[in-house]
Image (spheres, grey):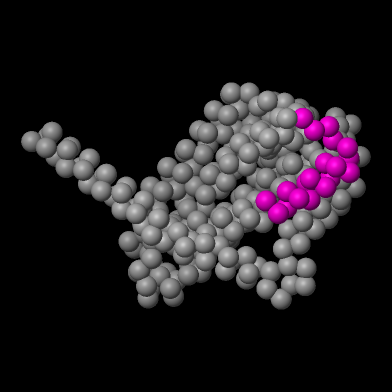
Amino acid sequence: MEEQKERIERKVGKTKVKTYIHNFIAYKELLKELVQRDIRIKYRRSFLGMLWSVLNPLGMMIIMTLVFSHVFRAGIDNFPVYLMCGQVIFNFFNEATTMAMQSILGNAPLIRKVYLPKYLFPMSKVCSCFVNFLTSCIALALVVVVTRTPLTWKLVLFVFPILYVFLFSLGIGILLSAVVVTFRDLQHLYGVIITGLTYLTPIFYPIEILPGWVKTLVEMNPLTSFVEMFRDAVLYGVVPGMELHIRCIAACVVALVLGIWSFIKQQDTFILKV
């Protein structure tokens, strides 16, 4: 009897997975439309349009370099590139998760009227932010050229931290989009959390200057691992160690599992709460 029950549960689980895969394939064009819509809305009535994705990080890099270079530069070579590597990774995570968190509530009228796979909404936000992130990497490339940063074949390894931060942001974004439907105060609390993460991620300071317990806390932050790996490839020309890969993969798996589990558990109640 127990074996039969387990067999049925496994069969049901496989059927659900197949359904999600089939829905994703069936609605991939809609996902593409949602991503394009988000990009158009963001730059609507803007004279420079997507060029702001290059100018914003470039402008922030110049300002922060002027402010922090005399404070932290003693221990950091090529501070502009060091700063910008951390900046583009963190800004993507911040923008992607913040927009994904609002995706279900923001599309409430559509969710009430039409059946759609609801995970498409947070996924489209993360994907549209990823397009902006890739555009902002042009600004990083310009800074690399201007500062004459040595380039090696190891630069191609930057795809790994980019993939990791995308998956991590997707998992956290899906989780937030589900939780905020029930716990609306998260919209206000998340700004405080992001501010804390800004200082717990070594964006504009070297991790070596931190005291013991603070350094441990910063190292536990998954964004630190993504930033370090990105700098290894772009700035230092170093092959990231296996331990760093394991930390990044573990963070992505935990974020995706928590996000997907929470979303699936609550998605049937969205229509009653949005």
- Looking at the image, which residue is at 63% across and 55% down? 131
Image quarter for residue 38? bottom right
Res. 1 in view: yes
How many marks are shown on the rendered structure? 0
Taking the image as shown, residue 109 lies to the left or right of residue 8, namely right
> What is the x, y in percent for residue 156?
68, 35
Quadrant of image for the C terminus:
bottom left
In magenta segment, residue 139:
yes
Residue 111 in the magenta stretch? The answer is: no
Q: Position of residue 170 (x, y in %)?
A: 52, 49
Residue 182 visible in image: no
**In the rendered image of this protein, does residue 46 appear above or below residue 85?**
below
- Which residues are drawn in magenta? 134-152
**Residue drawn 89% across the image and 44% down it:** 146
- Which residue shows up at 85% across the image and 38% down it? 79
Q: Is residue 237 above or below residue 190?
A: above
Q: Nearer the viewer, residue 93 or 217?
A: 93
Is the N terminus in the top left, top right, bottom left or bottom right quadrant?
top left
**Residue 236 in which image quadrant:** top right
Front in this rendered view, residue 58 or 159? 159
Against 50, is 242 above or below? above
- Decide if residue 176 is on the left or right side of residue 43: left
Image coordinates for residue 192, horizontal then vertical, percent: 63, 53
Residue 261: horizontal and vertical position, in percent?
Answer: 38, 47
Q: Main secondary structure of the magenta part?
A: helix
Horizontal side of residue 225 vs 203, given as left or right:
left
Q: Residue at x 58, y 24 (%)?
A: 243
- In this rendering, is residue 242 above or below 34? above
